[in-house]
């Protein structure tokens, strides 16, 4: 069964993005759900599918969401309490709609981080992940001091710079470009001006990464409603790709970088252009008007640019310079600030922004004639969206 | 009770930690292909089949490293700043190891041959993997 173009995102909504420890995560979830329903012109009773990302302890689980908001879905699912499943959730929704398991699926990511400390610290509910059997989800190993997700991102970036002989300061363009975009919104968590001098002065956390290479923790929710393609304001899901796993995969490195037990064989250009999201949509990088790239840490978009064939392997740090990924450039990326500046919303804020762009509703951030958008994570999951 | 820093030791991982306590580095190997692998598995990741633990030379090349300037784990406060190295063993397996005093002139740099050894960290009761200059004698 062909999924390409069969479904659409017919409504999007978000809560405010903020740090409000005294709030309930259900307040964020409800704000996003109601905004998405209003956007789609639907009532709660018309939702018959519910897929939740994150869940307890950072968010609300699917059963709590349904009970709290009076939903009665007949198809429910939930992914684990991390990022990396945004496109996968929307893919599951598209599959459910296409196969008749549900007709209107609310996809919800709601989480609250402001009251639980930093991942890696003992008072954070994820502390024990660094003692997960066979290693933490980002390469953590608490027994030797390898704590917190940033360490895996730092290790991969150190190896990347050495392998390709690149100056790590070229990385500054990622947080600087996204901050410039965030300043054009009225909702980003981080909207102060960020200069190269600020970046260079920023506190080292786990070298080679600095504070400005890390997305700030925040609270918020995003909801998207998937249904059969057709409605005039909808954005069609033209291509989908799942998350990779295995010995060739490290969540914060491109294929074949040589971190963990990966080989050192990078994707060829032909392999990058044959990624499932491209073949399903019958499209390639040259056709993309605006992109959302997963950026919990600033090196991650580099790897997605290479693995999805926007540039050659080892060239992304040079390729992003000169305004190419900024508004007005050839490939504007994370036009609402990404996770580094808008809010760490596990990629959902970026997908919502792509929908806004494709509907021509992005105001000062609008990419002219935006017709086709790619969202991608270095871990492999991806969505290709088209203006209906 | 202080903050946890000891690794999880169970039936699957115990051969590694028993050897570590004796100062030896052992890795699981695929019995059929002879290949070493990591992390531990009850069956070979190379097509399944039996696994046996064998001693390997505690040497390798430092492929990359990071330096912790911020404290996440309270027991390690006396160690800050400390490094973590990604070490490629001659058998092809990569392991991560603690690197003490990364700012000192004799600290191992990426590309160096390094020696792997086991030592305890503050708050820990089990010796864990460290990487240091291959030329240095280790206790």
Image (cartoon, coloured by chain):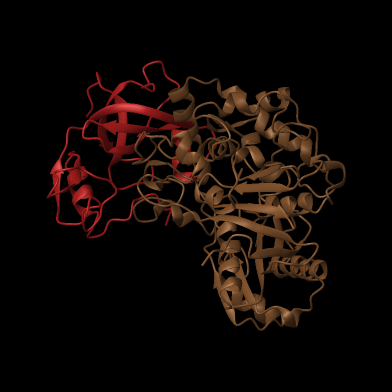
Q: Nearer the viewer, residue A231 or A244?
A: A231
- Height in image: A245 above or below B112? below
User: Residue A19 appears at what percent x and percent y?
Assistant: 74, 54
Tell me if I can see residue B17 in this picture: yes
Q: Which residue is drawn at the image coordinates 75% and 79% (left, top)?
A: A44
Residue at left offset 41%, top offset 46%: A249
Q: Residue furthest top?
A: B105
Residue at the image position 60 percent from the left and 23 percent from the top: A318
- Foreground: A126 or B105? A126
In the rendered view, does A362 fall on the left or right side of B107? right
Q: Quadrant of residue A234?
A: bottom right
Residue A127 location, x and y as percent? 49, 54
B94 sits to left or right of A309: left
Q: Which chain is brown?
A: A
* Residue A209 point in image, percent of width and height: 56, 32
Assign the C terminus of chain A to one quadrant of the image: bottom right
For residue B108, side relative to residue B42 (left or right): right
Look at 47% across and 45% down and name the residue there. Answer: A147
Depth order, front residue of A388/A167: A388
| Residue A56 in view | no
Q: Is residue A65 above or below residue B21?
A: below
The chain shown in red is which?
A: B
The answer to whether B41 is drawn above or below residue A56 in the figure is above
Count up the numbered dots. 0
Pick the residue in front: A127 or A246: A246
Rendered location of residue A152, percent (x, y)? 47, 41
């Amino acid at each position: 069964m062909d999924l390409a173009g069969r479904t659409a995102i017919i409504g999007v909504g978000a809560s405010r993005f903020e740090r409000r420890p005294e709030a309930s995560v259900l307040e964020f979830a409800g704000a996003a759900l109601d905004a998405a329903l209003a956007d789609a012109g639907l009532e709660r009773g018309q939702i018959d599918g519910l897929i939740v990302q994150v869940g307890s302890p950072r968010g609300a689980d699917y059963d709590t969401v349904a009970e709290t908001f009076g939903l009665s879905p007949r198809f429910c699912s939930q992914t684990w309490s991390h990022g990396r499943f945004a496109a996968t959730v929307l893919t599951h929704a598209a599959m459910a709609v296409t196969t008749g398991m549900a007709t209107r699926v609310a996809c919800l990511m709601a989480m609250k981080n402001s009251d639980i400390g930093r991942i890696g610290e003992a008072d954070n509910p994820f502390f024990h992940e660094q003692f997960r059997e066979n290693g933490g989800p980002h390469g953590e190993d608490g027994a030797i001091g390898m704590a917190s997700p940033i360490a895996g991102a730092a290790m991969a970036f150190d190896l990347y710079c050495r392998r390709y002989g690149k100056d790590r300061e070229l990385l500054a363009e990622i947080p600087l470009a996204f901050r410039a975009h965030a300043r054009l919104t009225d909702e980003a968590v981080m909207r102060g001006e960020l200069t190269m001098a600020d970046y260079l002065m920023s506190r080292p956390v786990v070298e080679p990464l600095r504070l400005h290479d890390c997305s700030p923790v925040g609270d918020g929710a995003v909801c998207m409603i998937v249904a059969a393609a057709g409605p005039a304001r909808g954005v069609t899901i033209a291509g989908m790709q799942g998350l990779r796993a295995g010995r060739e995969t490290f969540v914060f490195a491109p294929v074949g970088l040589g971190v963990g037990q990966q080989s050192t064989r990078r994707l060829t250009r032909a392999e990058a252009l044959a990624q499932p999201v491209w073949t399903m949509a019958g499209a390639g990088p040259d056709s993309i008007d605006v992109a959302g790239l997963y950026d919990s840490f600033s090196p991650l978009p580099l790897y997605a640019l290479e693995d999805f064939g926007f540039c050659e392997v080892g060239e992304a740090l040079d390729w992003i310079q000169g305004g190419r990924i900024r508004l007005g450039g050839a490939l504007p990326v994370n036009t609402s600030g990404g996770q580094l500046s808008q809010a760490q919303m596990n990629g959902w804020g970026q997908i919502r922004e792509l929908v806004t762009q494709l509907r021509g509703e992005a105001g000062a951030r609008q990419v002219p004639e935006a017709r086709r958008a790619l969202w991608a994570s270095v871990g492999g999951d991806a969505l290709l969206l088209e203006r209906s | 009770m202080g903050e946890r820093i000891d690794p999880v030791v169970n039936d699957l991982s115990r051969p590694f930690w028993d050897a570590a306590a004796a100062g030896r580095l052992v890795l699981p190997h695929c019995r059929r292909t002879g290949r070493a692998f990591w992390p531990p598995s009850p069956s070979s990741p190379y097509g399944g089949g039996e696994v046996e633990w064998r001693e390997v030379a505690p040497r390798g090349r430092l492929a990359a490293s990071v330096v912790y300037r911020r404290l996440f784990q309270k027991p390690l406060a006396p160690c800050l700043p400390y490094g973590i190295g990604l070490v490629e063993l001659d058998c092809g397996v990569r392991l991560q190891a603690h690197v003490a005093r990364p700012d000192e002139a004799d600290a191992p740099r990426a590309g160096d041959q390094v020696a792997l050894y086991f030592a305890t960290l503050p708050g820990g009761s089990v010796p864990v993997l460290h990487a240091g200059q291959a030329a240095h004698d280790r206790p």
